[in-house]
């Protein structure tokens, strides 16, 4: 195969499957309550810190296995920069069932899909994105990951 063809195929695959982003679970989220196996951000444009362009739509999706069952799932995105988590205006305390299957089933892997638009007014730079999914009826039951992103003009 020609190198160019290979690259084309590889980038097409990345678009279809989403680009795997580096993430870690939040502390002190417990593995016996929820495990997250993969986070994909498309486009990502880097393998260590995804670069997200202002004004553009990015699809974020992740696979998780909740060890709890609920009809009332909430989800929210935060900037975790220091002591306080700053809620991201576009997605705070949202109905998680709009983006993943409900009810959740304990022990069953499920996927959450979201299209995130990075507002033009947000500052540029490196941020820690924190994503949470929780049971509205028991906030001890939650899934949470952190991923570094760079916001660019
Ligand atoms: C799910 O939670 C129960 C207790 O609530 C625990 O006994 C079990 O080990 C957990 N399962 C997993 C896969 O962590
Ligand atoms: C998330 O997206 C994938 C791939 O497009 C799709 O197969 C899956 O059904 C979606 N899940 C939900 C809950 O929308």
Image (cartoon, rainbow, N blue to C red):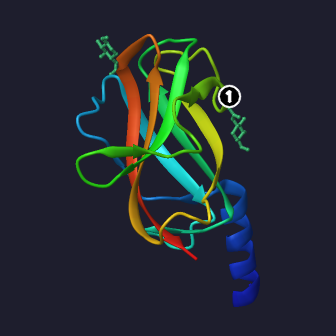
Left or right placement of residue 118 versus residue 107 in this view = right
Q: Quadrant of the N terminus?
A: bottom right
Residue 102 shows in this picture? yes
Seen at 52% across and 12% down, the residue is 70
- Give the quarter of the image for residue 117: bottom right
Q: Quadrant of the C terminus?
A: bottom right
Residue 123 image position (x, y, % from top left): 48, 68
Residue nearer the viewer, 116 or 27: 116
Residue 53 image position (x, y, % from top left): 60, 70
Residue 20 image position (x, y, % from top left): 52, 58
- Give the quarter of the image for residue 148: bottom left
Residue 14 image position (x, y, % from top left): 66, 64
Left or right placement of residue 152 versus residue 114 in this view = left
Residue on which disc 1 sits: 98
Seen at 30% across and 30% down, the residue is 31
Residue 2 shows in this picture? no
Q: Is residue 90 above or below residue 119?
A: above
Local crowd size for mark 1, using a 10 Å CA cut-off: few (<14), some (14–19), many (≥20): some
Identify the element where label 1 is drawn: helix
Seen at 55% across and 14% down, the residue is 72
Q: Is residue 4 above or below residue 47?
A: below
């Amino acid at each position: 195969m020609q190198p160019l063809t290979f690259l084309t195929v590889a980038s097409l695959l990345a678009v279809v499957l989403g680009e795997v982003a580096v993430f870690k679970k939040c502390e002190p989220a417990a593995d016996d309550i929820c495990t997250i196996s993969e986070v994909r951000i498309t486009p990502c444009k880097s393998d260590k810190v995804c670069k997200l362009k202002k004004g553009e739509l990015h699809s974020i999706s992740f696979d998780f296995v909740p060890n709890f069952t609920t009809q009332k799932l909430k989800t929210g995105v935060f900037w975790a920069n220091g002591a306080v988590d700053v809620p991201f205006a576009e997605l705070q305390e949202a109905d998680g069932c709009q983006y993943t299957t409900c009810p959740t089933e304990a022990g069953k892997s499920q996927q959450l899909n979201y299209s995130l638009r990075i507002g033009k007014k947000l500052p540029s730079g490196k941020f820690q994105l924190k994503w949470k999914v929780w049971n509205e009826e028991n906030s001890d039951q939650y899934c949470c990951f952190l991923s570094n992103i760079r916001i660019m003009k």
